[in-house]
Image: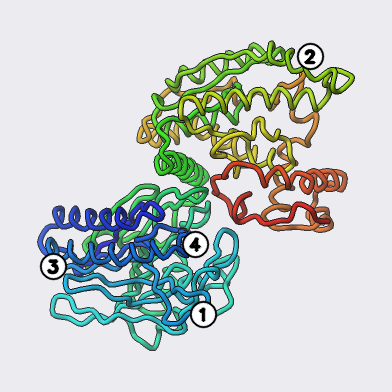
Amino acid sequence: MRIALAQTNPLVGDLSGNAKRLLEACLKLSHQAQGTPPALVVSPELSLWGYPPRDLLLSPEHLQQQNEALNLLQQGLSHALPQTALLVGVVEPAPDQQHPRLFNAAALVEAKGWRVVARKQLLPTYDVFDESRYFRPANQPSVLSFEAEGQDWRLGLTICEDLWVEDALQAQRLVGPDPIANLIPEKVDVLLNLSASPFGRTKASIRHQLAARAANRLNCPVIYVNQVGGNDELVFDGGSFVMAATGEVELQLPTCREAIACWDSTDRSAAATAGTMDSSESTDLERLFQALVLGVRDYADKCGFHRALLGLSGGIDSALVAVIAAAALGADRVQALLMPSPWSSIGSIDDAEALAKRLGISTTTVPIQDLMQGFEATLTPALDQAPSGVTAENLQSRIRGTLLMAVANQQGQLLLSTGNKSELAVGYCTLYGDMNGGLAVIGDLYKSTVFSLCRWLDSPDAMACRKELGLPEHNNLIGPEILNKPPSAELRPDQQDSDSLPDYATLDPLLNDLIEKHSSGAQLIAAGHHPADVKRIEQLFRRAEFKRRQAPPVLKVSRQAFGTGWRLPIAAR
């Protein structure tokens, strides 16, 4: 049997558009196919809706649109591919009025009609997931009897989390049934998994290991089809694959782009590869960069922005955001504002201009000294003194934030925030200043990761990726001047980040334990962090929660990002 994997990039809520994309993918595959077209095309979880649809699932209008979209798919297959069926991710209304009223399901669409054939059993409610708000769990396994090429096939059907049942391989196993174990007595010929699994820096390897374990337990191939694309703060990296019963990968689709490919159950001519992913540091950083580029590209395109704007300071954070934006949108669609103050070093101004020139993005320079003086003169009577200290420093940031928002508003641009996760964690950022923006591109990257990613971008290992994404092929894209510069906000004379914070080599491991492991102060100290650092950073961290609540959406690339998966109260002890 020939089965196609359709790794699609849906627009959330666009049911008719997503149906047309699925149909176009099927037609494209049919035109490319040599010989018999596939008997079955498998698409990702909720592929008709896009994941996650969140409260759109509560809309009766969208539920009606789903039926219309399924009818559209059926008519399209009947006309163009009558011998091909499509497995599509849908929602299924429950037969009663109890809440939740839906199942996360899969429908089989054929020329003769469509029907729901599977329901999801394990509903994630951790981190960014909130499926129990909308869905009720299935209580039995799903097996589809499917006839292809004169043979009856028994296909085991699972949806995303249903595959994540190995305590030894994953960080958190949901309480509930083991959908893989429940399929063992069914003696299925192939296991299908429809997924919408967001990017994570170790996710690709874990998915392979989970599929290999399922293939071993069921003694059959596993077909894993994952969504690709950016939806709000989530980035889905695709990477769909076919895992043989022996644990070898027989087909691997690319990451971070749409793709469709066929697997033939009888063809073993293709060279199989081991069921593990390359985990070298360079490959890890390349995947991270590609995920950020995809996140920016789709956020802009799906929200209707044709151009982006950012503030370029000559520092490493804004430099990395500028590179990501140029790769995502093209240099001709990116503009940078340079806003020097009396405390901006000549080196920083020169470095910002040189980077913009290397990237080919346009720049406008707007000095802020006169505005600073105007604010000081205006505020002095109200304060009975001139603004000073942190107040004066934050005024500079808010002046810049106001200028950026004004330009973005006037020109219809997406303003990209350039703050990193380390700053957001300890509140080393200014509300209505450098936190302004529509998307926090690197808000889930610790400062040390920003440096690592920039060093990789300037290394020979990055050249192929840079070429693929249309970036200039200079030996030094970021440049040693930016890479070797001590981090500084440049809001007062000779300021450096280390004046206010521990060195990032000390700070970032502490923050990682605090944020991603939810460690207590005692646990942090026991892990080797200095007690004075722990006390100081814990206090800064707790006090900054109100800032994080008002930050732009943060592209999630770690286990624990500041966003929908971060739900600490503001007023708390």
Asked if labels 2 and 3 touch by Cβ distance under 8 angstroms, the answer is no
The earlier-in-sequence mark between 2 and 1 is 1
- Label 4 vs label 2: CA separation? 59 Å
Amino acid type shown at disc 1 = Gln
Residue occupying image coordinates x 66% and y 30%: 433
Asked if labels 1 and 2 touch by Cβ distance under 8 angstroms, the answer is no
Height in image: 152 above or below 73? below
Amino acid type shown at disc 3 = Pro
- Can residue 501 be seen? yes
The earlier-in-sequence mark between 4 and 2 is 4
Q: Which residue is mark 2?
A: 377
The earlier-in-sequence mark between 4 and 3 is 3
Q: Residues within 10 Å of mark 3 (few under 14, many from 20)?
A: some
Q: Which mark is residue 98?
A: 1
How many marks the image carries: the answer is 4
Residue mark closest to the camera, 4 vs 3: 3
Q: Residues within 10 Å of mark 4 (few under 14, many from 20)?
A: some
Residue 182 in picture, x, y percent from top left: 44, 84
- Label 4 vs label 1: CA separation? 36 Å
Q: Residues within 10 Å of mark 1 (few under 14, many from 20)?
A: few
Identify the secondary structure beneath mark 1: loop
Q: Which mark is residue 206?
A: 4
Residue occupying image coordinates x 19% and y 53%: 28
Amino acid type shown at disc 4 = Ile
Residue mark closest to the camera, 4 vs 2: 2
Residue 319 in picture, x, y percent from top left: 55, 27
Asked if labels 2 and 4 touch by Cβ distance under 8 angstroms, the answer is no
